[in-house]
């Protein structure tokens, strides 16, 4: 019922209105549904007391949108009509729905229903980094992806993540990675060098993110709506593409704790896109630790003392540490105790932004310090900083084995991991200090493309190797 409203808006007012309605519902679900229903609940299998709950109606509509993203428009609408015909004047449950749609579409929807329908919570997907290496007239591109969870019991499987790559000229191409697990690499080849990559920019799946992007052509104010940020563009030398993501999950904790400073466990932002040199903008975000059912439940766990103790932390990318942002101002709007106000952040650049609070009396807990980083963690700049691990692969294609040849003897030992194209770890080995070559045996491997990841503890390089029979 709730999703049919969105279909009505799409039919009458167009796709932009549909996207706006879905985005608003998704934001409300992430912010309020678990409050209204006393917990995070699964869409299917709710108790009698929650039959007509926000989980069933609002999150149910959210999940119908995600199902459409999994199946594509043609199969989604065709198989819904087929389902209504097959079960007319009969009872049916979620398993019947799953099985009919799977049979009708030819898509195995078991993982979708197991993850999105039969368990509570949400997945969260993010790009740790983008790695680009020249390859003839094109580029080998590796996207390092991380999955975390918001109130869900297990990692989601086989999620069709659309990844859109942009060139500096605003050219773009979208490809799909079927993602499982906590960390993974998506490898592709492009005929242009990507300078920006975005997951699900067309908002086809309802994970724990609300986002919006603007093509910015004038110095003005831009409301990113459900991304919960307003951008005042002060200087614009050229057209910009700015995407703001509001992440409804704790930011990855600090690697080294700052005494007395606590990072939010509830949310953070990422600003990304194509920002020309000389771009200058100020962001405005609102904080709200109240119990208002229209604006609250954003920072309730974070704000435990005076609001003028709030700070903004920033990191350029996943390979960097959180640091205090150099220029921000907290506006408590006349009260330092009502847990509401706004923060101005100057000189916005690409990167991640998070709320923090100074409270020396609050005890540190183990979740506030990162202990197990994603082992795919990589940043492009490290390739240049660690030229000592430059390597080539031969023969390529390989039959029974291949060699990893380093440009010069290693000054430190390093780790080599081999993954198949889906990101599954196949083999790992350590190469000792002083080595210049390492042989990798491929017996038992199927004919395929594999990714060779070399990591010296400071940076990561990934190259591909093809095996043949």
Image: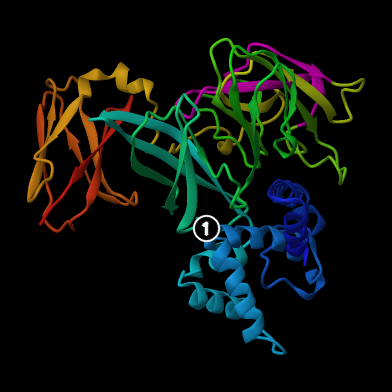
Q: Quadrant of residue 249?
A: top right
Residue marked by disc 1: 154
Q: Is residue 217 left or right of residue 109?
A: right
The part of the chain drawn in magenta is 303-331
Q: Position of residue 302 (x, y in %)?
A: 73, 33
* Relative height, residue 353 to residue 83 (above, below): above
Q: Is residue 260 visible?
A: no
Q: Is residue 294 left or right of residue 117?
A: right
Task: Residue at 68%, 50% (x, y): give it.
Answer: 15
Nearest the viewer among 458 and 381 is 381
For this orientation, the residue located farthest to the right is 334
Q: Is residue 311 magenta?
A: yes
* Relative height, residue 334 to residue 452 (above, below): above
Q: Position of residue 248 (x, y in %)?
A: 66, 42
Task: Residue at 61%, 53% (x, y): give it.
Answer: 122
Q: Is residue 442 left or right of residue 237?
A: left
Q: Is residue 404 magenta?
A: no
Quadrant of the image for the N terminus? bottom right
Q: Quadrant of residue 251?
A: top right
Quadrant of the image for the C terminus? bottom left
Tag 1, which secondary structure?
loop
Q: Position of residue 271 (x, y in %)?
A: 60, 28
Nearest the viewer among 263 and 228 is 228
Q: Is residue 461 visible?
A: yes
Q: How is the image coloured?
A: rainbow
Q: Residues within 10 Å of mark 1 (few under 14, many from 20)?
A: some
Task: Residue at 8%, 40% (x, y): give it.
Answer: 395
Q: Position of residue 48 (x, y in %)?
A: 79, 75
Q: Quadrant of residue 68?
A: bottom right
Task: Residue at 10%, 26% (x, y): give it.
Answer: 436
């Amino acid at each position: 019922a709730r999703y049919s409203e969105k279909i009505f808006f799409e039919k009458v007012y167009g796709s932009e209105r549909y996207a706006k309605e879905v985005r608003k519902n998704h934001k409300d679900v992430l912010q309020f549904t678990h409050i209204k229903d006393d917990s995070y609940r699964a869409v299917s299998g709710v108790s009698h007391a929650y039959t007509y709950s926000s989980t069933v109606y609002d999150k149910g509509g959210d999940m119908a949108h995600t199902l459409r993203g999994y199946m594509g428009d043609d199969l989604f609408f065709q198989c819904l009509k087929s389902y209504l015909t097959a079960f007319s004047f009969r009872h049916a449950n979620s398993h019947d729905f799953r099985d009919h749609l799977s049979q009708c579409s030819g898509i195995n929807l078991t993982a979708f229903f197991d993850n999105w329908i039969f368990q509570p919570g949400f997945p969260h997907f993010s790009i740790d980094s983008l790695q680009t290496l020249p390859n003839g007239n094109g580029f080998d591109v590796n996207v390092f992806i991380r999955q975390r969870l918001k109130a869900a019991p297990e990692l989601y499987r086989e999620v069709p993540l659309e990844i859109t790559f942009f060139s500096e000229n605003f050219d773009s191409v979208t490809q799909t990675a079927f993602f499982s697990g906590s960390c993974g690499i998506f490898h592709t080849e492009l005929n242009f060098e990507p300078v920006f990559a975005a997951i699900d920019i067309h908002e086809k799946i309802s994970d724990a993110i609300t986002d919006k992007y603007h093509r910015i052509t004038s110095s003005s104010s831009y409301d990113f709506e459900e991304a919960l940020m307003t951008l005042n563009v002060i200087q614009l030398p050229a057209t910009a593409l700015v995407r703001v993501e509001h992440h409804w999950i704790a930011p990855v904790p600090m690697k080294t704790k700052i005494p007395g400073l606590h990072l939010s466990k509830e949310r953070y932002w990422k600003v990304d896109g194509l920002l020309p040199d000389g771009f200058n903008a100020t962001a405005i975000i609102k904080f709200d630790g109240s119990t208002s059912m229209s604006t609250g439940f954003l920072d309730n766990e974070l704000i435990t003392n005076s609001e003028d103790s709030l700070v903004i932390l920033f990191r350029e990318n996943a390979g960097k540490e959180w640091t205090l942002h150099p220029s921000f101002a907290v506006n408590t709007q006349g009260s330092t105790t009502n847990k509401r106000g706004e923060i101005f952040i100057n000189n916005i650049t690409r990167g991640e932004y998070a709320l923090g609070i100074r409270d020396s009396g609050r005890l540190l807990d183990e979740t506030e310090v990162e202990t197990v980083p994603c082992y795919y963690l990589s940043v492009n700049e490290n390739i240049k900083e660690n030229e000592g691990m430059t390597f080539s692969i031969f023969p390529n294609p390989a039959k029974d084995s291949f060699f990893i040849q380093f440009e010069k003897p290693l000054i430190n030992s390093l780790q080599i991991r081999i993954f198949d194209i889906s990101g599954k770890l196949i083999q790992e080995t350590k190469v000792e200090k002083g080595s210049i070559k390492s042989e990798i045996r491929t017996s038992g491997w199927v004919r395929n493309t594999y990714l060779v990841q070399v990591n010296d503890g400071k940076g990561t390089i990934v190259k591909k190797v093809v095996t043949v029979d």
